[in-house]
Image (spheres, helix red, strand yellow):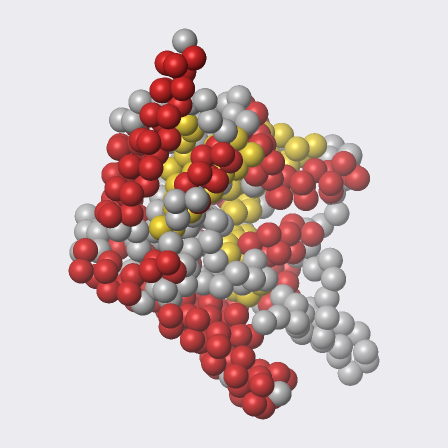
């Protein structure tokens, strides 16, 4: 079993992440804290653009910006031509979905209960136009998407299986590879939203068995906002025709006809921030240098410690489901709205997140949840930060109990 990072290494990494010096950050599931080196990589390219001109700087720094593609392929155990660099998770996932063949009346899309709300909105719009249907795969007793239940739902009308691997509203980790085995066995396209997974857990796209996998740079990878990674399995690529193209994704041939690129970059746009791409490359390099097994072990140790202590606070309910759990810890404080908890902690310099129904509507509705607070950890998270969050939450929970007692 891989050991977590030792405290001395964590402290050294924190010293190279300026955000750790100014805030107590428990919103790594929303966006994590970039390193000084990542910021410097972004700034360096902006300076090149100012000195040389943006177009000229882009040509001169091509090796630097293309490094992000190579490093992303290493991270996912993919081939370089299977990687598209996008403006974010939703941009990549949406581009791949929009590139699927047209939907027909009676077509079925099967989704896990934890599907990201933005993906659901996209799928529902397309399905409604065509007369297709969107159906939810049952979850097992642990709350995870049930691969056996999925198998029982399949027929010739199923055109897509979509899974959000790690939900935005809890620490559950879905069995992505087990779902992939079902999809491969039946030859059904399989999309994985890895927004919370990429940079947090080891990913091997061959083991997952997906045709498409997407993720952002800004979460566990600690890259800049406005960057994303899209994997498209090489054998699946020719089934995707982009909804729109440009001279990068489909350059014109000698006869003036568009020719789709033979790689995943057919889903890219010619217009993107090369400065941010330089930052993404640095963030990817840092993750690979640390090792995803080590990152996973460190995040898991922090999350387990936080989860156990939270569960022991009277008035605090930990809401995480699943057999295997991520670095996102979902909870609520009795008698307090999650958004109020978030605001009160923010006033003390502690940053957490809070989600309403729109983020993960199927799961929130199935569990009768209106809103959840979420504290998400990183390998950067220190034991002192965990103690500070717990102290603040004990005080908040105690205020609620004290208020109830006085009222009674």
Front position in the image: 326 or 30: 30
Is residue 166 depicted above or below 252 in this figure? Answer: above
Percent of width and height locating residue 179:
47, 38
Query: How many dots with numbers?
Result: 0
Residue 201 seen in this snapshot: no
- Which residue is farthest front? 406
Q: Horizontally, is 264 left or right of 67 in the view?
A: right
Percent of width and height locating residue 322:
38, 31
- Which residue is farthest bottom? 52
Is residue 51 depicted above or below 227 in this figure? Answer: below
In which quadrant of the rendered image does the C terminus lie? top left
Percent of width and height locating residue 31:
46, 53
* Residue depicted at 71% across the width and 50% down the height: 101
* Residue depicted at 42% across the width and 55% down the height: 32
Residue 386 seen in this snapshot: yes
Percent of width and height locating residue 395:
33, 31
- Which residue is farthest right? 255
Q: Horizontally, is 375 left or right of 216 in the view?
A: left
* Residue depicted at 59% across the width and 72% down the height: 273
* Residue depicted at 50% across the width and 23% down the height: 367
Q: Horizontally, is 201 left or right of 148 in the view?
A: left
Front position in the image: 348 or 178: 348
């Amino acid at each position: 079993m891989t050991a977590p990072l030792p405290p001395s290494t964590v402290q050294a990494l924190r010293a190279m992440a300026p955000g750790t010096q100014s805030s107590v950050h428990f919103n790594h599931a929303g966006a994590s804290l970039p390193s000084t080196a990542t910021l410097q990589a972004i700034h360096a390219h902006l300076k090149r653009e100012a000195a040389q001109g943006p177009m000229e700087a882009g040509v001169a720094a091509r090796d630097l910006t293309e490094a992000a593609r190579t490093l992303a392929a290493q991270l996912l155990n993919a081939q370089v031509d299977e990687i598209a660099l996008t403006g974010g998770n939703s941009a990549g996932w949406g581009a791949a979905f929009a590139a699927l063949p047209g939907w027909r009346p009676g077509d079925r899309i099967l989704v896990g209960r934890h599907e990201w709300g933005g993906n659901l909105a996209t799928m529902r719009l397309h399905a409604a136009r065509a007369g297709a249907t969107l159906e939810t795969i049952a979850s097992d007793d642990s709350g995870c998407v049930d691969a056996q239940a999925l198998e029982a739902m399949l027929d010739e009308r199923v055109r897509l299986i979509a899974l959000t691997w790690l939900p935005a509203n809890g620490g559950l980790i879905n069995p992505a590879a087990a779902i992939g085995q079902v999809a491969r066995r039946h030859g059904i396209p399989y999309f994985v939203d890895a927004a919370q997974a990429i940079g947090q857990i080891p990913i091997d796209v061959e083991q997952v068995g997906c045709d498409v996998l997407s993720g952002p740079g800004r979460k566990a990878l600690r890259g800049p906002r406005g960057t994303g990674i899209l994997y498209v399995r090489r054998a699946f690529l020719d089934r995707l025709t982009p909804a729109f193209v440009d001279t990068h994704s489909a350059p014109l041939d000698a006869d003036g006809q568009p020719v789709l690129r033979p790689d995943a970059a057919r889903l890219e746009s010619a217009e993107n921030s090369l400065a941010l791409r330089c930052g993404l490359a640095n963030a990817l390099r840092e993750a690979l240098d640390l090792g995803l097994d080590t990152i996973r072990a460190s995040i898991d140790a922090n999350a387990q410690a936080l989860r156990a202590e939270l569960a022991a606070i009277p008035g605090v309910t930990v809401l995480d489901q699943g057999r295997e759990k991520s670095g996102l810890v979902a909870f609520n404080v009795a008698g307090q709205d999650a958004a109020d908890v978030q605001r009160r902690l923010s006033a003390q310099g502690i940053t957490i997140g809070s989600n309403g129904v729109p983020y993960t509507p199927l799961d929130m509705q199935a569990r009768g949840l209106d809103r959840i607070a979420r504290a998400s950890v990183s390998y950067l998270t220190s034991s002192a930060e965990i103690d500070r969050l717990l102290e603040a939450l004990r005080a908040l929970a105690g205020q609620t109990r004290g208020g109830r007692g006085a009222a009674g």
